Image (spheres, rainbow, N blue to C red):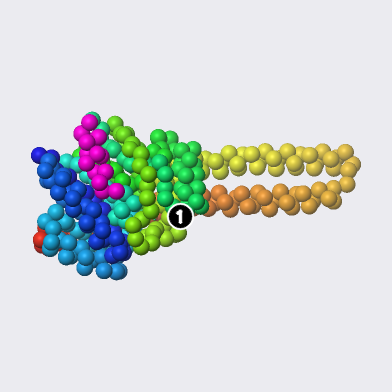
Amino acid sequence: MSSVTIGIPLYNEEEVFGSLLGRLEPVVRELKKEHSTTVLFIDDGSTDDTPKLLDSATQNHSWVNYIRFSRNFGHQVALTAILDHCTDDILITLDGDLQDPPELIPQLIQRLNAGNEVVFVYRKTRDEPLLRRLTYSSYYRLLKFFWRIPVQLDSGDYAAFSRKAYESLRDFREVHRFHRGLRSWIGFRQEGIGIERGARSAGSSKYSLWKLFNLAFDGIFAFSIFPIRFSLFCGILLFLAGFGFSFFLLASYVAGNELPTIYAVFGALTALALGVNFVFLGIIGEYVGRIYEQVKGRPQYLVERFVRKNGREIS
Ligand code: UDP
Ligand code: MG
Protein backbone atom coordinates (compact mmCIF):
# COMPACT_ATOMS: atom_id res chain seq x y z
CA MET A 1 0.00 0.00 0.00
CA SER A 2 1.57 3.26 -1.05
CA SER A 3 1.16 6.44 0.96
CA VAL A 4 0.07 9.91 -0.12
CA THR A 5 0.51 13.38 1.38
CA ILE A 6 -1.68 16.18 0.11
CA GLY A 7 0.04 19.48 0.99
CA ILE A 8 -1.98 22.70 1.07
CA PRO A 9 -0.68 26.20 2.02
CA LEU A 10 -3.27 28.42 3.72
CA TYR A 11 -3.12 32.10 4.49
CA ASN A 12 -6.26 33.69 5.93
CA GLU A 13 -8.55 31.19 4.26
CA GLU A 14 -11.34 31.08 6.90
CA GLU A 15 -13.96 31.72 4.23
CA VAL A 16 -12.88 28.77 2.10
CA PHE A 17 -11.74 26.28 4.72
CA GLY A 18 -15.14 24.68 5.40
CA SER A 19 -15.86 23.95 1.76
CA LEU A 20 -12.24 22.88 1.18
CA LEU A 21 -12.52 20.26 3.92
CA GLY A 22 -15.94 19.23 2.57
CA ARG A 23 -14.49 18.70 -0.92
CA LEU A 24 -11.38 16.91 0.40
CA GLU A 25 -13.31 14.46 2.57
CA PRO A 26 -14.79 12.23 -0.19
CA VAL A 27 -11.50 12.37 -2.12
CA VAL A 28 -9.52 11.23 0.93
CA ARG A 29 -12.10 8.51 1.67
CA GLU A 30 -11.70 7.21 -1.89
CA LEU A 31 -7.89 7.40 -1.76
CA LYS A 32 -7.76 5.58 1.57
CA LYS A 33 -9.05 2.43 -0.14
CA GLU A 34 -5.67 2.10 -1.83
CA HIS A 35 -3.28 4.50 -0.08
CA SER A 36 -2.67 5.66 3.46
CA THR A 37 -3.52 9.33 3.06
CA THR A 38 -2.66 12.48 5.03
CA VAL A 39 -3.50 16.10 4.35
CA LEU A 40 -0.77 18.45 5.55
CA PHE A 41 -1.90 22.05 5.82
CA ILE A 42 0.62 24.84 6.26
CA ASP A 43 -0.87 27.77 8.15
CA ASP A 44 1.30 30.55 6.77
CA GLY A 45 0.83 32.89 9.74
CA SER A 46 -2.90 33.47 9.27
CA THR A 47 -4.39 36.27 11.34
CA ASP A 48 -8.04 35.26 10.87
CA ASP A 49 -9.82 32.16 12.21
CA THR A 50 -7.90 29.68 10.02
CA PRO A 51 -5.81 28.41 13.01
CA LYS A 52 -8.98 27.67 15.04
CA LEU A 53 -10.56 25.91 12.09
CA LEU A 54 -7.39 23.85 11.66
CA ASP A 55 -7.41 22.88 15.33
CA SER A 56 -10.95 21.56 15.16
CA ALA A 57 -10.19 19.80 11.86
CA THR A 58 -7.32 17.86 13.49
CA GLN A 59 -9.68 16.90 16.34
CA ASN A 60 -12.35 15.65 13.95
CA HIS A 61 -10.33 14.01 11.19
CA SER A 62 -7.46 11.62 11.73
CA TRP A 63 -6.12 12.43 8.24
CA VAL A 64 -5.53 16.15 8.98
CA ASN A 65 -2.11 17.44 10.12
CA TYR A 66 -0.95 20.99 10.16
CA ILE A 67 2.15 23.10 10.60
CA ARG A 68 1.83 26.66 11.79
CA PHE A 69 4.52 29.13 10.78
CA SER A 70 5.67 31.75 13.28
CA ARG A 71 4.53 34.45 10.80
CA ASN A 72 3.60 34.89 7.16
CA PHE A 73 6.52 33.66 5.03
CA GLY A 74 4.70 33.41 1.71
CA HIS A 75 3.20 30.76 -0.51
CA GLN A 76 6.44 29.52 -2.07
CA VAL A 77 8.07 29.05 1.34
CA ALA A 78 4.96 27.17 2.53
CA LEU A 79 5.47 24.83 -0.43
CA THR A 80 9.09 24.35 0.68
CA ALA A 81 7.87 23.31 4.15
CA ILE A 82 5.54 20.78 2.54
CA LEU A 83 8.48 19.26 0.63
CA ASP A 84 10.56 19.22 3.82
CA HIS A 85 7.95 17.39 5.88
CA CYS A 86 6.61 14.87 3.40
CA THR A 87 7.67 11.28 4.12
CA ASP A 88 5.18 9.46 1.89
CA ASP A 89 5.57 7.81 -1.51
CA ILE A 90 3.54 10.42 -3.34
CA LEU A 91 3.18 14.15 -2.72
CA ILE A 92 0.38 16.30 -4.10
CA THR A 93 0.58 20.10 -3.74
CA LEU A 94 -2.44 22.31 -4.33
CA ASP A 95 -3.83 25.73 -3.46
CA GLY A 96 -6.38 25.98 -0.68
CA ASP A 97 -8.84 28.30 -2.43
CA LEU A 98 -10.42 25.49 -4.49
CA GLN A 99 -9.15 26.92 -7.76
CA ASP A 100 -7.41 23.55 -7.97
CA PRO A 101 -10.16 20.89 -7.84
CA PRO A 102 -9.16 18.15 -5.33
CA GLU A 103 -11.33 15.67 -7.28
CA LEU A 104 -8.50 15.51 -9.84
CA ILE A 105 -6.08 13.92 -7.34
CA PRO A 106 -6.90 10.26 -8.19
CA GLN A 107 -6.25 11.02 -11.87
CA LEU A 108 -2.92 12.70 -11.01
CA ILE A 109 -1.89 9.62 -9.02
CA GLN A 110 -2.97 7.33 -11.81
CA ARG A 111 -0.83 9.25 -14.34
CA LEU A 112 2.09 9.24 -11.87
CA ASN A 113 1.82 5.47 -11.54
CA ALA A 114 1.84 5.22 -15.34
CA GLY A 115 5.58 5.96 -15.27
CA ASN A 116 5.85 9.70 -14.61
CA GLU A 117 7.86 11.31 -11.83
CA VAL A 118 5.83 14.54 -11.98
CA VAL A 119 2.29 15.19 -13.16
CA PHE A 120 1.40 18.88 -13.24
CA VAL A 121 -1.81 20.71 -14.02
CA TYR A 122 -1.97 23.56 -16.50
CA ARG A 123 -4.79 25.95 -17.21
CA LYS A 124 -6.49 25.69 -20.55
CA THR A 125 -8.66 28.62 -19.48
CA ARG A 126 -8.78 30.84 -16.40
CA ASP A 127 -11.96 32.28 -14.96
CA GLU A 128 -10.33 35.58 -13.99
CA PRO A 129 -10.46 39.22 -15.18
CA LEU A 130 -9.09 39.84 -18.69
CA LEU A 131 -6.16 42.02 -17.56
CA ARG A 132 -4.98 39.38 -15.04
CA ARG A 133 -5.30 36.63 -17.64
CA LEU A 134 -3.36 38.65 -20.21
CA THR A 135 -0.62 39.50 -17.69
CA TYR A 136 -0.22 35.86 -16.68
CA SER A 137 -0.18 34.53 -20.20
CA SER A 138 2.36 37.10 -21.49
CA TYR A 139 4.51 36.52 -18.39
CA TYR A 140 4.76 32.78 -19.07
CA ARG A 141 5.70 33.52 -22.67
CA LEU A 142 8.40 35.93 -21.45
CA LEU A 143 9.77 33.16 -19.21
CA LYS A 144 9.94 30.89 -22.23
CA PHE A 145 12.20 33.49 -23.81
CA PHE A 146 14.49 33.79 -20.75
CA TRP A 147 14.79 30.21 -19.59
CA ARG A 148 17.19 27.61 -20.83
CA ILE A 149 14.89 24.83 -19.65
CA PRO A 150 11.41 23.89 -20.87
CA VAL A 151 8.70 26.15 -19.45
CA GLN A 152 5.46 24.46 -18.52
CA LEU A 153 3.25 27.21 -19.89
CA ASP A 154 0.28 28.31 -17.75
CA SER A 155 0.91 25.77 -15.01
CA GLY A 156 0.55 26.56 -11.32
CA ASP A 157 1.63 24.68 -8.22
CA TYR A 158 -0.99 21.94 -8.50
CA ALA A 159 1.06 18.81 -9.15
CA ALA A 160 1.82 15.26 -8.07
CA PHE A 161 5.39 14.19 -7.32
CA SER A 162 7.01 10.80 -6.89
CA ARG A 163 9.38 10.37 -3.96
CA LYS A 164 12.33 10.73 -6.32
CA ALA A 165 10.98 14.03 -7.65
CA TYR A 166 10.07 15.67 -4.35
CA GLU A 167 13.26 14.54 -2.64
CA SER A 168 15.24 16.11 -5.49
CA LEU A 169 13.34 19.36 -5.02
CA ARG A 170 13.97 19.24 -1.29
CA ASP A 171 17.71 19.54 -1.99
CA PHE A 172 17.22 23.01 -3.50
CA ARG A 173 17.99 25.43 -0.70
CA GLU A 174 17.77 28.68 -2.62
CA VAL A 175 16.01 31.53 -0.85
CA HIS A 176 14.16 32.93 -3.85
CA ARG A 177 12.05 30.04 -4.93
CA PHE A 178 9.80 29.71 -7.89
CA HIS A 179 8.53 26.20 -7.40
CA ARG A 180 6.95 25.69 -10.78
CA GLY A 181 10.30 26.58 -12.33
CA LEU A 182 12.28 24.22 -10.09
CA ARG A 183 9.78 21.51 -10.93
CA SER A 184 10.57 21.96 -14.59
CA TRP A 185 14.32 22.19 -13.85
CA ILE A 186 14.59 18.73 -12.28
CA GLY A 187 13.61 17.01 -15.52
CA PHE A 188 12.62 13.30 -15.32
CA ARG A 189 9.51 12.13 -17.09
CA GLN A 190 6.72 14.67 -16.61
CA GLU A 191 3.19 14.96 -17.92
CA GLY A 192 0.72 17.85 -17.94
CA ILE A 193 -3.02 17.64 -17.54
CA GLY A 194 -5.07 20.58 -18.88
CA ILE A 195 -8.09 21.85 -16.96
CA GLU A 196 -10.53 24.74 -17.18
CA ARG A 197 -9.50 26.63 -14.06
CA GLY A 198 -12.31 28.30 -12.12
CA ALA A 199 -12.24 31.35 -9.85
CA ARG A 200 -11.37 31.01 -6.15
CA SER A 201 -14.36 29.71 -4.23
CA ALA A 202 -14.55 32.53 -1.64
CA GLY A 203 -12.55 35.42 -0.22
CA SER A 204 -9.98 37.43 -2.14
CA SER A 205 -6.55 36.59 -3.55
CA LYS A 206 -3.87 36.25 -0.85
CA TYR A 207 -1.21 37.35 -3.30
CA SER A 208 -0.88 41.10 -2.88
CA LEU A 209 0.43 43.00 -5.90
CA TRP A 210 3.81 43.20 -4.17
CA LYS A 211 3.96 39.43 -3.56
CA LEU A 212 2.95 38.79 -7.16
CA PHE A 213 5.63 41.18 -8.35
CA ASN A 214 8.26 39.37 -6.26
CA LEU A 215 7.18 36.00 -7.58
CA ALA A 216 7.35 37.27 -11.16
CA PHE A 217 10.89 38.59 -10.55
CA ASP A 218 11.97 35.28 -8.99
CA GLY A 219 10.72 33.47 -12.08
CA ILE A 220 13.04 35.56 -14.24
CA PHE A 221 16.11 36.34 -12.12
CA ALA A 222 16.39 32.98 -10.36
CA PHE A 223 16.43 31.12 -13.65
CA SER A 224 18.30 33.28 -16.09
CA ILE A 225 21.35 35.51 -16.38
CA PHE A 226 20.03 36.80 -19.68
CA PRO A 227 19.08 40.26 -18.27
CA ILE A 228 22.62 40.86 -17.02
CA ARG A 229 24.07 39.66 -20.31
CA PHE A 230 21.65 41.87 -22.21
CA SER A 231 23.13 44.84 -20.32
CA LEU A 232 26.52 43.91 -21.71
CA PHE A 233 25.16 43.86 -25.28
CA CYS A 234 23.50 47.24 -24.78
CA GLY A 235 26.68 48.62 -23.21
CA ILE A 236 28.72 47.57 -26.25
CA LEU A 237 26.11 49.01 -28.60
CA LEU A 238 25.99 52.33 -26.75
CA PHE A 239 29.79 52.51 -26.65
CA LEU A 240 29.98 51.99 -30.41
CA ALA A 241 27.25 54.57 -31.03
CA GLY A 242 28.99 57.08 -28.76
CA PHE A 243 32.32 56.42 -30.42
CA GLY A 244 30.83 56.85 -33.92
CA PHE A 245 29.05 60.04 -32.93
CA SER A 246 32.18 61.57 -31.40
CA PHE A 247 34.14 60.66 -34.50
CA PHE A 248 31.49 62.33 -36.66
CA LEU A 249 31.63 65.49 -34.51
CA LEU A 250 35.40 65.64 -34.72
CA ALA A 251 35.44 65.06 -38.48
CA SER A 252 32.78 67.71 -39.00
CA TYR A 253 34.79 70.18 -36.88
CA VAL A 254 38.00 69.46 -38.76
CA ALA A 255 36.11 70.07 -42.02
CA GLY A 256 35.41 73.58 -40.70
CA ASN A 257 31.69 73.19 -39.73
CA GLU A 258 30.00 74.97 -36.84
CA LEU A 259 28.88 72.69 -33.98
CA PRO A 260 26.22 74.45 -31.85
CA THR A 261 22.99 72.50 -32.56
CA ILE A 262 24.79 69.23 -32.36
CA TYR A 263 25.29 69.85 -28.61
CA ALA A 264 21.55 69.39 -28.03
CA VAL A 265 21.71 65.99 -29.68
CA PHE A 266 24.73 65.21 -27.61
CA GLY A 267 22.84 66.13 -24.43
CA ALA A 268 19.96 63.87 -25.42
CA LEU A 269 22.31 60.99 -26.07
CA THR A 270 24.02 61.49 -22.70
CA ALA A 271 20.64 61.36 -20.94
CA LEU A 272 19.80 58.18 -22.82
CA ALA A 273 23.10 56.58 -21.90
CA LEU A 274 22.64 57.57 -18.25
CA GLY A 275 19.13 56.12 -18.21
CA VAL A 276 20.33 52.84 -19.66
CA ASN A 277 23.14 52.82 -17.11
CA PHE A 278 20.75 53.12 -14.19
CA VAL A 279 18.46 50.42 -15.53
CA PHE A 280 21.39 48.04 -15.73
CA LEU A 281 22.69 49.03 -12.34
CA GLY A 282 19.25 48.06 -11.09
CA ILE A 283 19.48 44.70 -12.81
CA ILE A 284 22.88 44.05 -11.28
CA GLY A 285 21.39 45.11 -7.95
CA GLU A 286 18.71 42.43 -8.32
CA TYR A 287 21.38 39.75 -8.59
CA VAL A 288 23.62 41.19 -5.87
CA GLY A 289 20.62 41.47 -3.53
CA ARG A 290 19.76 37.86 -4.18
CA ILE A 291 23.35 36.78 -3.46
CA TYR A 292 23.25 38.76 -0.19
CA GLU A 293 20.00 37.14 0.92
CA GLN A 294 21.36 33.73 0.02
CA VAL A 295 24.70 34.07 1.86
CA LYS A 296 22.99 35.16 5.08
CA GLY A 297 21.92 31.53 5.25
CA ARG A 298 18.88 32.20 7.42
CA PRO A 299 16.28 29.46 7.85
CA GLN A 300 13.58 29.86 5.25
CA TYR A 301 10.78 29.59 7.80
CA LEU A 302 10.19 28.97 11.50
CA VAL A 303 7.63 26.51 12.77
CA GLU A 304 5.46 27.60 15.69
CA ARG A 305 3.81 24.20 16.05
CA PHE A 306 3.27 20.96 14.21
CA VAL A 307 -0.06 19.37 15.05
CA ARG A 308 -0.73 15.80 14.05
CA LYS A 309 -3.60 13.39 14.26
CA ASN A 310 -6.29 14.05 16.89
CA GLY A 311 -4.87 17.41 17.86
CA ARG A 312 -1.61 15.98 19.23
CA GLU A 313 1.10 18.60 19.11
CA ILE A 314 4.52 17.19 18.33
CA SER A 315 6.58 20.36 18.34
N1 UDP B 1 -0.94 31.66 0.34
C1 UDP B 1 -0.03 31.45 1.37
N2 UDP B 1 0.75 32.50 1.79
C2 UDP B 1 0.68 33.74 1.21
C3 UDP B 1 -0.22 33.93 0.13
C4 UDP B 1 -1.00 32.85 -0.29
O1 UDP B 1 0.07 30.34 1.92
O2 UDP B 1 1.40 34.63 1.64
C5 UDP B 1 -1.78 30.51 -0.10
C6 UDP B 1 -3.26 30.83 -0.24
O3 UDP B 1 -3.95 30.63 0.99
C7 UDP B 1 -3.70 29.83 -1.31
C8 UDP B 1 -2.46 29.71 -2.19
O4 UDP B 1 -1.37 30.16 -1.40
O5 UDP B 1 -3.98 28.56 -0.76
C9 UDP B 1 -2.55 30.54 -3.46
O6 UDP B 1 -2.89 31.88 -3.13
P1 UDP B 1 -4.06 32.68 -3.88
O7 UDP B 1 -5.13 31.73 -4.31
O8 UDP B 1 -4.51 33.81 -3.02
O9 UDP B 1 -3.27 33.23 -5.14
P2 UDP B 1 -3.86 33.53 -6.61
O10 UDP B 1 -4.59 32.28 -7.04
O11 UDP B 1 -4.78 34.68 -6.43
O12 UDP B 1 -2.66 33.83 -7.43
MG1 MG C 1 -5.98 31.30 -6.09
Dominant secondary-structure state across the stretch colored magenta: helix
Q: Identify which amino acid the numbered label 1 is placed on.
A: Phe
Range of magenta residues: 101-114
Position of the C terminus, as image quadrant, is bottom left
State the residue position of label 1.
213
Q: Residues within 10 Å of mark 1 (few under 14, many from 20)?
A: few
| Residue 128 shown left or right of residue 256 in the figure | left
Identify the residue at horizontal 29%, vertical 48% (top origin).
101
Identify the residue at horizontal 68%, vertical 53% (top origin).
271
Q: Position of residue 139 (x, y in %)?
A: 48, 45
Q: Position of residue 285 (x, y in %)?
A: 49, 53
Identify the residue at horizontal 75%, vertical 42% (top origin).
246
- Magenta includes 104? yes
In the foreground, 238 or 159: 159
Position of the N terminus, as image quadrant, is top left
Q: Position of residue 115 (x, y in %)?
A: 23, 30
Check the image and report above or below for 14 versus 291: below
Residue at the far right in the pictured view: 256
Is residue 206 in view from this perspective?
yes
Q: Secondary structure at mark 1?
A: helix
